[in-house]
Every structure is written in C-alpha cells, then in structure tokens.
Amino acid sequence: MCECGSHRQTFLFGLPTSGSMRRCLAGELPMRRRDWLAAVGATAALLGTAPSLVAAKLYGKPVQYDFISSGVVKGSQTTIVMPNGTYDIRFAFTDRGRGPDLRSLIALDTNGFISSLQTTGNNYLKVPVAERFTARNGVATWKNAVENQNEKTPARRFYISVDGSPEEGAMIARAALRAHNGTVPLWPGGDASVRKVQTVDVTNGQQSRRVTMYELLGLDFAPSPLWLDEDGELFMWGSQWGAVIPVGWNGALEKLLDAQNARTADLGRELARTLPQRSATAVAITGVSLFDSESGTLVPNSTVIFHGDTVAAVGGNDVTVPSDARRIDGTGKTLLPGLWDMHHHLSAEYGPRILAQGVTTIRDPGNNPDYISTTQKQYESGELLGPRVIIAGLIDGTGQYTAPIGVTTSNATEAIARVRDWKNHGAVQIKMYSSLDPKLVPVIAKEAHSLGMRVSGHIPAGMIAEDAVHAGYDEIQHVNFLFLNFMPDIKDRTQTPLRLTAAAERAGTIDLQSQPVKDFIALLKQRDIVSDPTLVIFNSETATRPGDIASTGFAEIAGWLPLQIRRGLTTGGLPQSPELVKKYDASVKAFSAMVKLLHDSGVRYVAGTDDILPGFDLIRELELYSEAGIPNAAALAAATIQPARVMRMDDKLGSLRVGKLADAILVYGNPLDDITQLRRVGTTIKGGVLYDTRALYATASVKAPSVA
C-alpha cells in the first residue's frame, strides 16, 4: 500500500493476498549482487548454528530461492528436507525497514497433509511469531496470532498458516493434486482446490525447465497462481509485488508473471462478457428517494431516467416514463450518485469488487505507469469490469526507502521529464513521495501546474506539511502527515516507518485546540488545500486487536469473506503492548477528531481508502466520518460531489443531473439515516450499464447476503 507499505495486510504463504496487495509496496534500495551473496552467506552461517540443521548440511540438499521485488533481490527462501522427511524452511525479505524473518519446521503425513508445524521469527511488521500445529490421534491443535484451538476430527485436513512461507503453497497444491477430486478440506475451515492452467518452457541460458502453472481456489478473492517444476517442486510463487524463484532463474520471472497476468485478464474478460446488464431502451427508476449530493438532501418519490450512458430525466410524478423503458421500482430504496474512492492503488482484478461496493470512480495515486494506463483503457472499453480510473502519477526520490512503483528522480531536469512522462500516460495529477529531495518539490509543482495538473503527496522527509503547502501542494494524502506537522523532531526520518509509528503513538498528544493547530488549519483553508485522510487504514492499524474481529470495523462483512482474508482481518497490525495500546487508543480518537476539525473549519476533504480491503473499505471510511460526528450527508458528499469538484469533473459526475453520466447506486435502505446501509447496494450503474452487486461479489468468492 502506498502510504507506508506497512499497513495491515492479509498474507497467504508469505506474500500478500490479492485482497490486500499494494502495487506501491516494497520500495527498498536495490541490493547489489555482492551484498545479496554476503547476506546468503550470513544466513548459511546462522543456520549452521542450529542443531537440527547439522544433519541437514550432511544429508539434506538446500534449495535456494531468491525473493524478487521490482526486479531486485530483496530476500530468500531456503528449503531443506531432513533425513526424516521434515522440511526446514527459512523465509525472509526486506521492505523499507519491514519484512518477515521466519523459520518453519514442517512434517507431512502420507497424504501430504501437515502433521506438525512450528514457525518462529517475526512477521512483516516485525511482530514476534510463534505458530504451532499438530494433528495426532484424531485431534488437531493449533495456536497462532489469532487462534488457539483444539478440534477433534475423524478426517484429516490441511492446515493453512497465518504466518507461512511460499513452500507451503507447493505443499497444499501437491496434496490437492493427490486428492481424488482435487480438493482438500482445511483447518480452520473451508476447502481448497487446485486446477492446472498451462505448462511452459523456461531457460536461464544454460538449462531448460518445464514448469506448470496451477491455481489454488478457496483461499483468496481470486485464484492464487503458483508454478511447480517437473518433479512437483515449487518453482515460482508471487506477483509483481514480490516473488520467489530458484536462484539462477530470475530471468524467467518476467515470462511467468506475464503468463499470470494474461490468465487474470482472460478470467476478467469472461466476467465482462457475462455480468453487465445493458438495456437497448431507457432505464427508469421510479418511486425512489434520491440523494441530491449538491444540496445534501433526500428527495422522496423521485423518478430518474437513464438513456444510454447519460441521465435523461430527474423529477417526480411529472416525469414521463417511455413506454418501452425498463422499469425498476425504487420504493424503500435510495438512489445515489456512484461513489468515488480517491485513494486506491489498483490491481485489475479488483474491478468487480469495487463496482459491487458501489464505487464507480477511483483515483490511483501510485502505480506502474504502463500498467495503470493499460488498465484504465481496459475498463473504459469494457474489456474488463471496473470503475472509471483517474491517474495520479507517483514520483519519488532514490534511497533505501524509495517506492518501487511510479518513477524516481534525483535532479531538476529529470524531475521535469518525469512529470511530462506521467502526463503522456494520462495522469492529471502528480503525487510526490517520501524520499523525494525537498528541493525538487517546487520544481515538480511548477511543472505540473503549468501542464494543468494537480499536485499532492506524502510530505517528503526533511519537510513538514506547512512547507509542502508553501512549495506548491494542492492536496495532502493521509491524516498522519497532518499530525507530523507538529512533530518537527522527526521530520528528517519520515521516509521510514517512523511516519506510521510516531503518528500512532503521539497523535493523541496533540492538542487540536492549540494555536499552532488553529494556524495550520487556517493555512489549509486559505490555500484551499484538500485532505485525502484515508482514515480507515490508520484506524485499522491502530485500533485492531489480534483475534478481536469487532475491533477491525469489518465485523459485519467478515462472514462474507474467503477463509484467509477473514483470518487476516485481525492480524498484521502494529506491534502491541499495554502501554502502546493506550497510546494507540488516544491516536485513533485524534485521527477522527482531525477529520471532524477539517469539516468544521471548511477545509475540503475527500474519501479514500489506500485499498486496505478492496470492495469493502470505502464504506468503512464513510462510517468513520459518521462516527466522528460528521453528518451523513456530508460524509456522502466526500465520496460523490466533493471529489468530482476537486478533480474538476463535476460537469459530468458527482451528482445526478440531466446530461451527466449515468453513474449511480441503488441502496436498499436510507444511508442518510444510517450510513451502514451502504452495505446494501443492490445495483451499481456505471455509464448506464447495470450490475447486480451480489453477482459481482460472487466472482470473488464473497458470500454477500441478499439485499432484497
């Protein structure tokens, strides 16, 4: 995720699931090859001190994998099969000061199911890991970060780790392939199946291998691809974000990732052929309560007619409905403009889930230039299902904590060229990131403004928010940077995870009624600086308690989700202790209070999520605004007319007016009375095309209840 690369994520076999993967994660200084070899040597020395590995060095043959992110080796997996058949696995990588360092000892039974597992070390956020599982005499016992269970069972099941390694993906794939129907039951619940997709030949210039792509189903929103070699051993697991592949085969990674992307696109095209409901005639929604986002009021007993991709009529009983129109009874329902998510790092496969949530427009503030440009076109053409996409091109500096996506720059000439390149890729905004040289901020801002582009971003290390405003910012991403404005003692280190941890620990100590805060808010108001607070991700990071689903804010929809996504809701947060939790609780309140202060002070703010849980998170963002005391009508405006105005697109979007684009959602209930009713979107309309939201969710293994 873009803000810090350290927000809560759900991991499957050591890597983020498709439900939580951020395309701007991982930015670390490229590791030189000799440094990597030194690191491997150090790891080997460490392993040599472990008594259980002494025999392995004599009898077992280590299999070494590189972990590659953004084309750079940033970690490894070492797999050793002991003489007794036990797997000894070491998995570690680095990501801007974060990253797991895990060691697993795993024994398999004769069916390839895990009979015992012990994993120790630390997870992605450096939280200690002590995960255990045993299956013996018909009893399964396991303990991890969120579960402590003991279950009797007559049948064997495969245990899915909370903190695991890519090697475990190969284990479950082999077990499922051995099963008569390709399906294995799971601990703590559900089933997983495997299907073969394709076999390809790869070469490293000296050797050739035949590797086969399989997909695991039932664990994630989307099928999880992995590659096994001719012997059924792991060859590759991962994505552009990060992947493991045997040492010496890094050159084959691009071919395998391209094949995975092509497969994802094929699956997406099939959905685009079957799910849209297009009408050859007008669509009339009658008797509906219409949310007028411009006035913030609800207009009862309204009639709205869509024809083609535009709004043809809006009114009451005086509106004449064409005799051949498709009629939809809006009684008891609310019709709203399509929602906006103003901070979403897009993966193409998120599209159906985003539409299911009622979001018809997103702004992507950090992605690979070619990828996001291509995905934008695929959504526009209808080749793939997804929202309208507004591109904000990310520019960062170089260094240990640089973002791996977007582009980087180190001098003024290069910076100007980067802005122009983003403009050519369709960007209408530039987002500056945390490692950028502060001297380049006004250079980039001036060039972007000359091209009619907006300017926003993190606050680069060495600056505070006030400095960025004076240097040309139009908008500030993330609520933590508003608080860091009052922590100048750490401003030179905010390219590190400190920008998260300091805000989480100290935001609650900032007096929002103090004169410095009042002066800062007045500056934002005077300069018309927009805030993109992404409150949901900071609330989740600081408020979530391990194993406590209620603390996540997603308890209502937890039961809708696939197994590993559901388990991940309460894992992966910031390290906790009684003292830290007390500080976090105060900061959670402060984050919300800051957004309420923006609202009360007339500072514009827009709803965004940093894609913490695509398909569900925008509504949680709006719930937090409501809980902070912001009127529901204003919260809804932050996801409809306000972002349309900020992006200077309110002539086409943001409200339901004759002549505007036909983007709308039909909600079963009244979100102005209860904002949580947004979880009952029954129909999403984008460009006049209708989508059944429950059918959209079903494509991602989401079991959303009926809204009727």
Image (tube, rainbow, N blue to C red):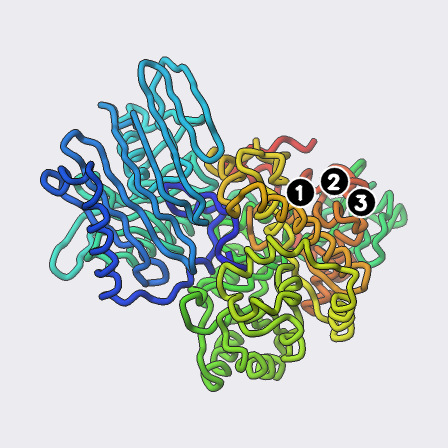
Instruction: Reply above or below: 633 against 525.
Output: above
Residue at 69% of width from left, 38% of height from top?
A: 680
Location of residue 505 in the rendering, given as x and y in whole percent from the top left corner: 60, 53
Nearer the observer: mark 3 or 2; the answer is 3
Foreground pick, 2 / 578: 578
Location of residue 220 in the rendering, given as x and y in whole percent from the top left corner: 45, 39
Nearer the observer: mark 3 or 1; the answer is 3
Q: Secondary structure at mark 2?
A: strand
Name the residue carrying label 1: 683
Is there CB contact under 8 Å for labels 1 and 2? yes
Name the residue carrying label 3: 672
Crowding near the residue tagged with mark 1, few <14, some 14–19, many ≥20 C-alpha atoms within 10 Å = many
The quadrant in which residue 585 appears is top right
Crowding near the residue tagged with mark 3, few <14, some 14–19, many ≥20 C-alpha atoms within 10 Å = many
Location of residue 604 in the rendering, given as x and y in whole percent from the top left corner: 75, 64
Label 1 to label 2: alpha-carbon separation: 10 Å
Residue at 66% of width from left, 69% of height from top?
A: 475
